[in-house]
Image (tube, grey):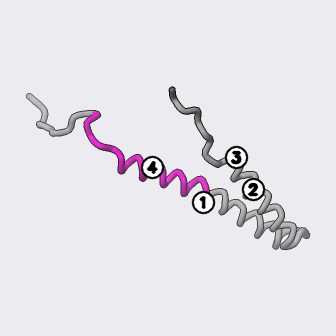
Amino acid sequence: MAGPASDYHRGEMDIAEQQSTFQLMMFMTKWGSLYTAALVLLLTMWFCTSAGFLGGAFAAIAMVVIGTLVLREKKTAAAH
């Protein structure tokens, strides 16, 4: 018995929208996670330690700067 007929042919679909959605989601996840972690660090240092607001702000800013350097897009060598 034959299976149902289908118009789907593997590899022929335009996936540009799926790719752009995936890239946007990865961008938002990456940077959102960094800034959420920095906010948690700031609030933890501010309210749960003797470092206070300035200590927490310094630590959060340092985290954002280092995280930005680590997470930024790397330039790739152009293909010849």
x, y (%) of residue 66? 75, 52
Which comes before the other along the chain, label 3 or label 4? 4
Question: Does the residue at mark 3 contact the one at mark 1 (Cβ under 8 Å)?
Answer: no
- Give the label, 3 or 1, closer to the camera: 3
Which residue is depicted at the point 10% across and 29% down? 2
- Give the label, 2 or 4, closer to the camera: 2
- Give the label, 1 or 2, closer to the camera: 2
Which residue is label 3 attached to?
Answer: 70
Vertical order, 41 against 17 (above or below): below
Which quarter of the figure has residue 29?
bottom right
Which residue is label 2 attached to?
Answer: 65
x, y (%) of residue 49? 87, 68
Q: Is residue 28 magenta?
A: yes
x, y (%) of residue 58? 83, 64
Judged left or right of residue 51, residue 9 is left
Which comes before the other along the chain, label 1 or label 2? 1
Which residue is depicted at the point 72% across and 62% down? 38
Q: Secondary structure at mark 3?
A: helix
Vertical order, 69 against 80 (above or below): below
Which residue is label 1 attached to?
Answer: 32
Furthest toward the top, the residue is 80
Marks 3 and 2 sit apart, C-alpha to C-alpha, by 9 Å
Marks 3 and 4 sit apart, C-alpha to C-alpha, by 21 Å
Which residue is label 4 attached to?
Answer: 22
Vertical order, 79 against 48 (above or below): above
Furthest toward the right, the residue is 50
Question: Magenta part of the protein: which range?
Answer: 11-32
The kind of residue tagged 3 is Val
Marks 3 and 1 sit apart, C-alpha to C-alpha, by 14 Å
Marks 4 and 1 sit apart, C-alpha to C-alpha, by 15 Å
Judged left or right of residue 33, residue 44 is right
Dominant secondary structure of the magenta stretch?
A: helix
